[in-house]
Amino acid sequence: MTQTTAPRVRTLVLLILAVAGALLAGAAPASAHAALTGSDPAQGAVVDTAPPQLSLTFSEPVAVGDDSVRVLDPKGERVDKGDPANPSGTTYSVRLVSGLPDGTYTVAYQVVSADSHPVAGAFTFSIGAPSETTVSVSAQGSDEGFVGWLYGFGRYVSYAGFVVLAGGACFVLACWAPGARVRAVQRLVVSGWLALTAATLGLLMLRGSYTTSGRIGDVFDLELLGDVLQTKTGAALVSRLLLLAAAALFVAVLFGAYARTADAADPDRAAEGDGGEPDKRDLTFGLALGGTVVAAGLAASWAMSEHASQGLQAGVAMPVDVVHLLAVAAWLGGLTALLVALYRAPVETPVGRDAVRRFSRLAFGSVVTLAVTGVYQSWRQLGSWSAFTDTRYGQLLLVKIALVAVMVAVAFLSRRWTQRLADARVATAAEETGRAEGTERAEEEKQPAGTVPAEASETSKTSEASEASKAPEASGAENDEAGQDSVRAAQLARQRAAAEAARQKRLRDADPNRFGLRRSVLAEAGVAVVLLAVTTVLTQTEPGRTEQDARAAAATSSSASATGQGSGAVSLTMPFDTGGKNGKGVVSIDLDPAQAGDNALHVYVEGPDGTPVDVPEVKIALTLAAQDIGPLPVAPDRITIGHWSASGVQIPMAGDWKVEVTVRTSDIDQVTVSKNAQIG
């Protein structure tokens, strides 16, 4: 059975890793955790005169640099000057060159949010009237290229390394002390330390390029590295490296001094009456306390620089995040160590039912802790039930909850296999005890009266050997033969020991209860790999609360721009294309004062180059669908080239009115465009 199980295990593990890799590779680029909630001028706005500065407002504080905000004219030339300033709170402004001509201007920004993630975007506004522009700025940020992929992979490896390091050590100390002597478990924990250390160094090197240019060549830029070290994220990564040095000392003691005293520290032996010497108990307590402190410090290096450090109740969220990460490590890391122990532990040090039961209790406590802290984190990051389905963060969180539910269900099966294994062991032990007693009685009955017992016979043989040792030494040939016999005897003894170990391993692997436990734990570990991948993507995704707030702010900004709340008038700009010759242009509507009652209406028609153009006909219609009013026709009079107006336009009531404009550019070419405006 061993020969058929190992290939299946390898195949399943490779399949799990492939699924996790596909999940990471197929995930969308990491969204920023701060969002642009407003700007002045607003996105898509058309202002009458050139503004002296441009202001951007974000949902949380961001870090800005020299080139964080760029304003480009229609020819692609920069018209901003000076570094961005932070006049108040989350608003950042940059001065513009004075006397800017009419036309469409492009704003491109790239900043770093307070929770360490890049924020990039672009939009346009116009002065006087929209115009053609040669600028083509992508909203893709530095975190969406190859460097961004490497950074995301490094985050996954760092989480996995922490889970294996902290969880594996916790499994040894709390559940299975003899595991400190098992090479496979030692390699697992050390591999976790190496993975976390390498990933942390990689993240530190990638950080500068990740938040600025996104170029692979900037990874080794020492100036960028110096800038990173002065940021909160850089300080967190350096702190993690220092704590990993302490973790290396902890691992050395765990697999050194503690491993040598593991038998006395084993709770199974303690239950049998061997409580261990005081210094051994002190070593166990010291390792548990020191390991908890180091693990909490490592978890805090994430909490102090990511989601928990910003937003609502940061002072509460960071400790909760630390506890959440520790519970994840104890559960998933302990599960990984248990899987390794079940498949790779030597015959003389098998993982027993008591160790599995202790881990089951530890896992249950971890799941309860995850549930409590997870509810708080979900409320903090989502803020509403609708965010579960309306935001990417909420959708990923639903996937994570489903995976946790699957793991708990599989863990229930593991508990059943553990109980069956325990019952089978009790039955086997009773059977072996009865067989041994029966054999002893049979041997006593077969012993003839007056014969010498086996012990006496052995004593006699020993005496004879002692007498023989006093005889003269044998010849050289006889000594050689005796030496060869001893070598052969040693080889035979080793062969017998190996054969016995192989036999015991076959018997152990043939146990259906142990085989079932192995499969269920392997299934748990497979789900855990995917769960960790989803968690990594989740930490790089914009929180649902932030996403919804940004949407609401953008809608408010758009509505304010459309209704011209600052001046009491509505200004609407709509591009049109009738499909005929010279059929493209822009029509603008001004409605003043945009209130119920009398209003003045002005219509401007311009070509693609921003110059006024004449068209044969322009018609206006107003509709209030919520009250089933309209369409109300408006026939403006031509004033001059490209300008029409109408006075005394009656709007019966306030509401969200639909303004339709029909533009005819020839006898057969016309088009109707529309836009909504809040009146009153």
Image (tube, grey):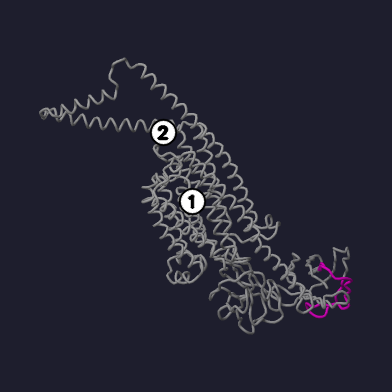
The disc placed on residue 505 is 2
Towards the viewer: 563 or 431: 431
- Earlier residue among tags 1 and 2: 1
Q: Is residue 195 magenta?
A: no
Question: Quadrant of residue 537 in the image?
Answer: bottom right
Position of residue 582 measured from the top left corner of the image (x, y, whole percent): 73, 70
The part of the image, by quadrant, that contains residue 412 is top right
Q: Quadrant of residue 602?
A: bottom right
Q: Which residues are magenta?
A: 634-660
Screen quadrant of the C terminus: bottom right
Say if 185 sits above or below 200 in the image: above
Q: Amino acid at mark 2?
A: Lys
Camera-nearest residue between 366 and 217: 366
Q: Residues within 10 Å of mark 2 (few under 14, many from 20)?
A: some
> In what quadrant of the picture does the N terminus appear?
top left
- Residue 505 located left or right of residue 646: left
**In the rendered image of this protein, does residue 52 appear above or below residue 528?**
below
**Disc 1 target residue:** 167
Circles 1 and 2, Cβ within 8 Å, touching? The answer is: no
Q: Nearer the viewer, residue 341 or 609?
A: 341
Magenta highlight on residue 651: yes
Q: Residue at x 58, y 53 (%)?
A: 369
Q: Secondary structure at mark 1?
A: helix
Q: Amino acid at mark 1?
A: Gly
